[in-house]
Amino acid sequence: MIRSTVNRRGFLRALAGSALLAGCSPLAVVNGLVPSGTYRATKDLHYGQHPRQALDVYQPASTTTPRPVVIFFYGGNWNAGERGGYLFAGEALASKDIVAVIPDYRLYPEVRFPDFLHDCAAAVRWTFEHIAEFGGDPSRVFLMGHSAGAYNAAMLALDPEYLRAANVDRRRIRGLIGLAGPYDFLPLTGEITKAVFGFPDTAPTTQPIHFASAGDPPALLVTGDADHTVDPGNSARLAARLRKSGVPVQEIVYPGVSHTRLVGALAAPFRRVAPVLEDVAAFVNAR
């Protein structure tokens, strides 16, 4: 499915320029523009002993009944990122009456594959055990991620090993939401990626597409056709493999949208760039 977008490239370039002049990161500027009345945040909740085994929860401002839950894993090539930079994603989901969980996880060079996946699985276990305390419905939990985070979400959703090791029944996952994820990226090219995944002895079992099979959760796979960071073909190939296995898949390609603009479109100031948030909310609410 191809979705039309509104071109706001000039505005986004101006925003990035102003961030550099002010000595701020673009994420800090975006977070500074997030409306404050749409969510309640509970931060620094630990799902493990390591300092990076922590997460934040964003609830809708007013929750009267248990709401669906989305666990959002951010990207950063498995060597960068922190949950505090993704307030805009938590607010976005909360504004759609969804409870959002945003975990940190250990990064390279401290860890390599598959250690960060075990962290993500532990965050999922914590969610099932505790999310009812924050107005979330543990029977409606979705995994979502952008870029490397979409890889993490896909591996947990498709390979039963990681959730099983965390004492989580994979059948409890209601859906996978991948934004511009690398799901089928052998042979490895980037130096960090090679180090993370054990080049030259990288196994096919590092690839989410390897595990696509009947019984996997429904998937929403979203990408932009101007993504020059992660080949959009990753989403197309995974979608095709899942469909062949009889798994319901919704595949959306936004024209003219790049890798970073895709996740940035979740933020309140930039939602006209592409209807990412609307499409994510529709997928969640349909299940």
Image (tube, rainbow, N blue to C red):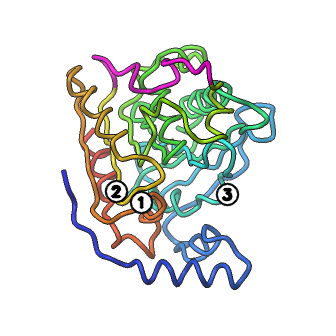
Residue 49 % position (x, y): 80, 31
Q: Amino acid at mark 3?
A: Gly
Q: On the picture, is 212 further left or further right than 48?
A: left
Query: Image quarter for residue 240?
Result: top left
The crowding category of the residue bearing disc 1, from other C-alpha atoms within 10 Å (few below 14, some 14 to 19, many at least 20), is many
Distance of label 3 from label 1 (alpha carbons): 19 Å
Which class describes the residues within 10 Å of circle 3: few (<14), some (14-19), or many (20+)? some
Q: Which residue is mark 3?
A: 84
**What residue appears at the point 35 percent right and 47 percent down from the top-left corner?**
232
Residue 203 percent coordinates (x, y):
54, 17
At label 2, counting other C-alpha atoms closer than 10 Å, the crowd grade (few under 14, some 14-19, many 20 or more) is many
Magenta stretch bounds: 200-216
Left or right: where 231 falls relative to 38: left
Task: Return the mark for residue 224.
Answer: 2
- CA gap, disc 2 and disc 3: 25 Å
Front residue of 146/215: it is 146
Count of number-bearing discs:
3
Counting residues from the start of the chain, the first of labels 2 and 3 encountered is 3
Q: Give the number of the mark in front: 3 or 1.
A: 1
Q: Nearer the viewer, residue 117 or 55?
A: 117
User: What residue would you read off at disc 1?
Assistant: 262
Q: Position of residue 69 (x, y in %)?
A: 45, 42
| Residue 89 % position (x, y) | 51, 58
Q: Residue at x 32, y 32 (%)?
A: 238
Under mark 1, the amino acid is Leu
Distance Cα–Cα, label 2 vs label 1: 7 Å
At label 2, which amino acid type do we have? Gly
Which badge, 2 or 1, is on the more N-terminal residue? 2
